[in-house]
């Protein structure tokens, strides 16, 4: 058992400031999106190691391996994904089909299609052509416990599918019949560990594990779910490559996901796949021995040690500022034992779920906007307007300016 909740002390401390170019106070700080530029400094010093050269005659075909359910996935990427999961210990990869997508957005939509045309079909062959669901059971509701990722609702309803639709907060869901529950763990926006909340044997569960990496949260056990997906953008910071992947037990689901991706984009960029595989390999090779992270190595040269210290530092500085504030508050996270680094640690989420606690101020997003800070309001996450999600993943100069402006906001 780990110690009690570990809050950054605010007594007699000052906000730590790293040397960085100052930004103009007139610049709008866009912290609405989780653009992970925080890791640029680390990858800049490994530019040569991560360089990929693709010749003009290479990677020209749509096809990688027609014998696999995900026929457009490069073998190098599949190998690198499994190696990275085994290194961190954050997911079971044995006896799983790997499906690559253009980020988690495409994976999420492909899973909604795959589940509603396969899992509820009842024939087990995965073709879904004669879906036995009665017309009054369609579209299948998609739910998630609030506060939930703000894009789930929009993405579920964007195609206006007759197969599924957004069903709202899982805590309020009480209908009979098939449903899909999305479990985000750690949760976006509030960083908490989640499990399914709907109690029924008629549903299917999708686990969004985008933030289940050692820099954000303690790795308490390998995730071992039937359907779970991860992203390259949040694991390493390379959002521009648009790579995500799902680990799926059921071959029929994997094939249906592949069909959706085939119809929407005829596969996933092989250039991006090869780049992702190269960077994952660099991370794993840098550890040499999978147990080397337990050694007393204080130089932070390994990616997950570097990024965890970076996130820890940012949360310490943020808590110092909020601790001196009578306007805002932050969630508290209990310490847990992390299997990856072999010590008790708390969570350092990619986003701060900031609450405005001042009486008379009902809209936290609006208040921050007055100080040229763009966050994402709580109502978009199924919560209330006293909350706002702000990204912790910006470049250092932006993050420091955010802290300075946050500290300038006084009561009344």
Image (cartoon, rainbow, N blue to C red):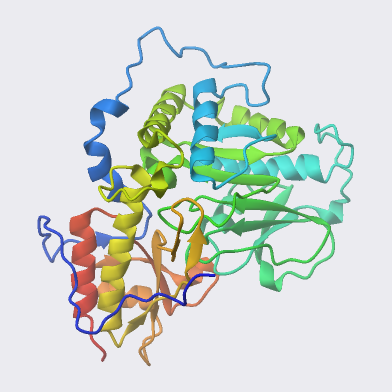
Tell me residue 267's x, y (percent): 55, 26
Residue drawn at (60%, 39%), measured in percent from left and top? 246
In which image quadrant can residue 180 be found?
Answer: bottom right
Given residues 324 and 118, the one toward you in this image is 324
Farthest residue, direction front: 296
Examine the rendered structure and indicate whether residue 153 appears above or below residue 108.
below
Of the 4 image quadrants, the one containing the N terminus is bottom right
How many numbered dots are placed on residues in this image?
0
Given residues 160 and 120, the one toward you in this image is 120
In which image quadrant can residue 110 be found?
Answer: top right
* Relative side of 55 to 63, left or right: left
* Relative side of 156 to 374, left or right: right
Q: Is residue 108 visible?
A: no
Farthest residue, direction top: 57
Examine the rendered structure and indicate whether residue 326 appears above or below residue 162.
below
Tell me residue 106's x, y (percent): 55, 40
Tell me residue 103's x, y (percent): 49, 40
Residue drawn at (85%, 56%), measured in percent from left and top? 136
Residue drawn at (13%, 66%), measured in percent from left and top? 25
* Relative side of 43 to 265, left or right: left
Of the 4 image quadrants, the one containing the C terminus is bottom left
* Relative side of 51 to 191, left or right: left
Given residues 300 and 243, the one toward you in this image is 300
Tell me residue 379's x, y (percent): 49, 72
Q: Is residue 185 visible?
A: yes
Examine the rendered structure and indicate whether residue 232 appears above or below residue 391.
above
Residue drawn at (19%, 83%), measured in percent from left and top? 12
């Amino acid at each position: 058992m780990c110690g009690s909740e570990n809050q950054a002390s605010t007594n007699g401390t000052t906000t730590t400031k790293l040397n960085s170019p100052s930004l103009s106070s007139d610049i709008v700080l866009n912290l609405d999106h989780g653009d992970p530029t925080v890791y640029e400094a680390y990858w800049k010093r490994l530019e040569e190691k991560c360089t990929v050269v693709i010749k003009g005659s290479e990677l020209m075909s749509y096809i990688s391996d027609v014998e696999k359910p995900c026929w457009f996935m490069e073998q190098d990427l599949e190998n690198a994904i499994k190696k990275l999961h085994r290194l961190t210990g954050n997911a079971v990869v044995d006896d799983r089909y790997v499906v690559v997508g253009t980020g988690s957005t495409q994976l999420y939509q492909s899973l909604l299609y795959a589940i509603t045309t396969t899992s509820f079909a009842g024939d087990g062959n995965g073709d879904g052509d004669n879906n036995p669901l009665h017309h009054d059971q369609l579209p299948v509701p998609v739910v998630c416990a609030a506060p939930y990722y703000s894009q789930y609702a929009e993405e579920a309803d964007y195609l206006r599918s007759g197969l599924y639709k957004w069903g709202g907060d899982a805590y309020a869901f009480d209908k009979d019949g098939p449903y899909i529950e999305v479990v985000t763990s750690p949760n976006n926006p509030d960083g908490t560990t989640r499990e399914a909340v709907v109690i029924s044997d008629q549903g299917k569960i999708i686990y969004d594990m985008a933030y289940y990496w050692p820099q954000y949260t303690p790795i308490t056990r390998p995730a071992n779910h039937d359907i779970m997906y991860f992203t390259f953008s949040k694991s390493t910071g390379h959002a521009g490559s648009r790579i995500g992947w799902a680990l799926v037990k059921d071959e029929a689901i994997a094939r249906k996901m592949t069909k959706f991706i085939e119809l929407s984009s005829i596969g996933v960029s092989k250039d991006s796949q090869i780049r992702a595989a190269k960077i994952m390999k660099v991370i794993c090779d840098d550890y040499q021995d999978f147990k080397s992270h337990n050694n007393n190595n204080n130089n932070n040269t390994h990616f997950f040690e570097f990024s965890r210290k970076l996130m820890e530092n940012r949360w310490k500085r943020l808590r110092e500022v909020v601790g001196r504030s009578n306007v805002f508050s932050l969630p508290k996270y209990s310490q847990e034992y992390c299997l990856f680094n072999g010590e008790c640690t708390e969570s350092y989420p990619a986003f701060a779920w900031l609450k405005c606690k001042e009486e008379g101020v009902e809209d936290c997003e609006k208040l921050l906007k007055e100080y040229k800070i763009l966050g994402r309001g709580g109502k978009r996450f199924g919560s209330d307007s006293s909350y706002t999600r702000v990204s912790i993943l910006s470049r250092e100069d932006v993050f420091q300016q955010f802290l300075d402006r946050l500290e300038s906001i006084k009561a009344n």
